Amino acid sequence: MQRSEVAAYIRRHVGKIAREWAGVLRARLAAYRRMAEPALVRAMETNLDVIAHLIETGRYPRGARYVARLAEMRLRYEFGIGDVIRSLFLCRDLLVTRLDGIGSVGTSGACRVVGRAMERLLTDFAERFQALQLREQRRRSEQLVRMQEQIKRHELERQVQQAEKLASLGQLAAGIAHEIGTPLNIISGNAEYVLMHLDKTSARRTELRGIIGETERIAAMIRRLLDFARPKPLRVEPLDVNQLVTDTAAVLARPAEKAGVELRLELDERLPLLPADRGQLEQVFVNLGLNATHAMPTGGTLTVTTRRARRRTSSGGREPVLAIAFKDTGVGIAPKHRPLIFEPFFSTKGAGEGTGLGLAVSERIVEDHGGDIRVSSRAGYGATFTVRLPLERRRADE
């Protein structure tokens, strides 16, 4: 059988062969079922024309995209490379079956003609697909490098902004402490002096207690502001986190009971000791517990859990951490508030009910320990704040 005879036969029966080829592919290779049959048939019609030209002349027609199309289909539809090669062998078998008995040479001649064309096709496919894959890997590597550089740049910008914010708050706190502290102490001291000398039945005693209480609240706010703006150095020692959570629960028990909140502890008894500052972490846990209690004005459940976990590091590895989660069944966090909850002075509480520094101070303390706080919440379905602390202390220059 002459090559021209084979090519002419293929061209006369392109439509029928393409539909049959598409049917065979979809029946025998599950991967090709992901591709719509009309699109697959159109691709096969074009490709059969290219194969006919390749059989007849031994070269691809100008502008032919057969091999590139195969490689593109492989990437786009996530076909295994074995699926593509098997599809080419199916095409060869189909053509040999179709050409059986045509011409003087018969099946063996058709097999040789088609086989040589398919051998060329497979060789070109392997070479072009490898080039395409290398190009794709290069593109993805460059994209990954750009993303990592972007992340580093954003993190540096965030750190610079945070440093500037802390510097401004430090100056503000120092000014407030100096300008307000002295008159505040005088007001409080005079109110206590008058209270001491008032008759126990005097109606003025309630007013004086109110003055003293408000001065103490302002003083506490100044102390928190100073704590946030001028963080204390960590006093790191081996810490039993479960014991700290239990002690914190004892502190939270009274306000939780008053708010109708049930407090549950689910502690992993196999936790190792954690290098941390007990006093500062206790402040974090109390802040998170009180916030959760305030988020359940009609009562609910606060569940505190401890467990071992792993988290991804900036270098792409994974490190062991202790995870302490505070999960409430309260009102949740509105989506518009999520980006703001760790900002200083942001609060959803009413006037006089909060300073908006609790979460900001907590985040700073956790970050000083090399950890982070993750938040998950849906408005109306509660919230979970998870503190993750590394089991190994890293040096400051790392």
Image (cartoon, grey):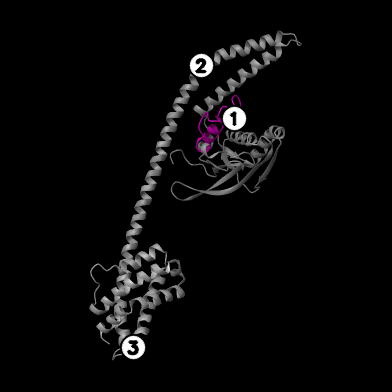
Secondary structure category for the residue under label 1: loop
Looking at the image, which is closer to me, 160 or 66?
66
Residue 237: percent from left, percent from top? 57, 37
Q: How many C-alpha atoms fall within 10 Å of the one at disc 1: few (<14), some, or many (≥20)? A: few
Q: Residues in magenta?
A: 337-364
Rendered view: 122 above or below 273: below
Looking at the image, which is closer to me, 294 or 225?
294
Task: Inspect the image, locate mark 3, and give the three-letter code of the amino acid beneath it.
Answer: Thr
Q: Does residue 67 appear left or right of residue 390 in this picture? A: left
Is residue 234 shown to the viewer in this render? no
Task: Inspect the image, locate mark 2, and give the three-letter code of the amino acid beneath it.
Answer: His
Q: How many C-alpha atoms fall within 10 Å of the one at disc 2: few (<14), some, or many (≥20)? A: few
- The residue beneath circle 3 is 107
Contact between labelled residues 1 and 3, with CB atoms less than 8 Å apart: no
Marks 3 and 1, the one that precedes in the sequence: 3
Which numbered dot is residue 349? 1
Quadrant where the N terminus sits is bottom left
Marks 1 and 2, the one that precedes in the sequence: 2
Quarter assignment of residue 334? top right
Q: Does residue 32 appear left or right of residue 218 in this picture? A: left
Q: Does residue 163 appear left or right of residue 67 in this picture? A: right
Instruction: Residue at 62%, 38% (x, y): give it.
Output: 331
Contact between labelled residues 3 and 2, with CB atoms less than 8 Å apart: no
Rendered view: 8 above or below 248: below
Quarter assignment of residue 125? bottom left
Instruction: Residue at 38%, 73% (x, y): give it.
Output: 85
Secondary structure category for the residue under label 3: helix
Marks 2/3: CA distance? 102 Å
Marks 2 and 3, the one that precedes in the sequence: 3
Residue 29: percent from left, percent from top? 45, 73
Marks 1/2: CA distance? 28 Å
Task: Inspect the image, locate mark 1, and give the three-letter code of the amino acid beneath it.
Answer: Lys
